[in-house]
Amino acid sequence: MSGESKGRPSLASEHSPRVFRLKASTGKVYHAHLVLQRARRLEDVVMALLVCPAHTLALRGILATGALAAALAGSGCIEMVGADLGKYVERDEKHFSVAGKPDVTLSTFDGSIEIRPWDRPDVQVVVEKRGRDKDDVAAIEVNATQTGDHVEVTVTEPKNRGAGGFDIHFNNFRSAKLIVSLPASSDVAARSGDGSIDIERVTGRMQLRSGDGSIRGRRLGGDVTAHTGDGAIKLDGVNGALDVDTGDGSITVAGRLTSVRARSGDGSVTVRAEPGSAPGGDWDIVTGDGSVTLEVPDGFGAELDAHTGDGGIHMQDITLSNVSGTIGKHTVRGRLGSGGPALRVRTGDGSITLRQSLSAERGEP
């Protein structure tokens, strides 16, 4: 099965993959996968060519934008030859029968992961492998194992080590998307090296990790751990404890929460504790740069410790006792309700808003 990509991208366009032909001084032609975002030096391109003796290579680490890309193109060193070479697609289906609650581990080197419940006593994993052609896709390796109710599917691509110890991923236009169907009551560990993760209507322990991609979940019953190196995290209708962090992106979480650890290196953080939430442990909400909004239900008890490096602290329909600090200034400490676990809120640069949540808002159907 195959699909066609449409349109020819602009060389100056940001945030989208491009394929270029690099002409070395020796006259050899190299292919490199350049991602047009966040400017890097021309020397990075030259060094990449020097460390790899291969005729064809794919470099994810070289980044260029606007002026740099235009300058390289104008110099005659780069000739654009195409885009989106991962147009050849094959599907590989794996089926596993389970007797009890499944414990499912999923991993792909590059591609999104979608997880949905169904009413069958088995787990199905569809691997959608994508590449330039049949041989390219055939190099993608799918390793599927089952021990009792534990199911593991790992998808990898071949890689080689170049001069100087660099890992060089040849023909790096491959990806592998995982489409997963499993019983609603399942434990899940899902990891993508570069891709989004989307999960809904699952009850169990969930561990979600992406090297570079968003993470989204809806109607999740159980404790959730989510990490992405670069991307937003949005979790709606969670019933349990949350431990989430992103290196660069916003965080939005909501549900009947027992404990929350939410950290963003650069992005806003919104936590909505719906009626029925009761702290069962300390809460820690931190962003390096961005606003923080926290909604808690009536009767919520905790010991608040809020601080912003540059911004104000605002209370809406919230009563604090044993207050130290001045509301509206940079630091406020006080007791919510009858007190309880620690509620620590921090932002390096942004406002903090604490208000009462009025009603439970469920995630999307």
Image: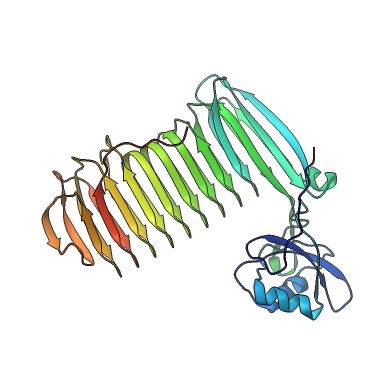
Instruction: Tell me how many marks there are.
Output: 0
Q: Is residue 235 left or right of residue 356?
A: right
Q: Nearer the viewer, residue 94 or 134?
A: 134
The residue drawn where x is 74% and y is 51% is 158
Compared with 323, 147 (above or below) is above
Point out the residue furthest to the front here: 7
Compared with 153, 291 (above or below) is below
Q: Nearer the viewer, residue 256 or 110?
A: 256
Where is residue 311 shown, x and y percent of the image? 29, 67
Q: Quadrant of the N terminus?
A: top right
Quarter of image, res 191: top right
Q: Nearer the viewer, residue 225 or 312?
A: 312
Where is residue 215 shown, x and y percent of the image? 51, 47
Q: Is residue 274 left or right of residue 145?
A: left
The residue drawn where x is 85% and y is 79% is 25
The residue drawn where x is 51% and y is 21% is 100
Where is residue 226 shown, x and y percent of the image? 46, 46
Q: Is residue 71 left or right of residue 235?
A: right
The residue drawn where x is 72% and y is 65% is 10
Point out the residue furthest to the right here: 27
Quarter of image, res 123: top right
Compared with 120, 86 (above or below) is below
Point out the residue furthest to the left here: 322
Where is residue 224 shown, x and y percent of the image? 43, 41
User: Is residue 58 shown to the viewer in this render?
Assistant: yes
Q: State the scheme by which the image is colored.
A: rainbow
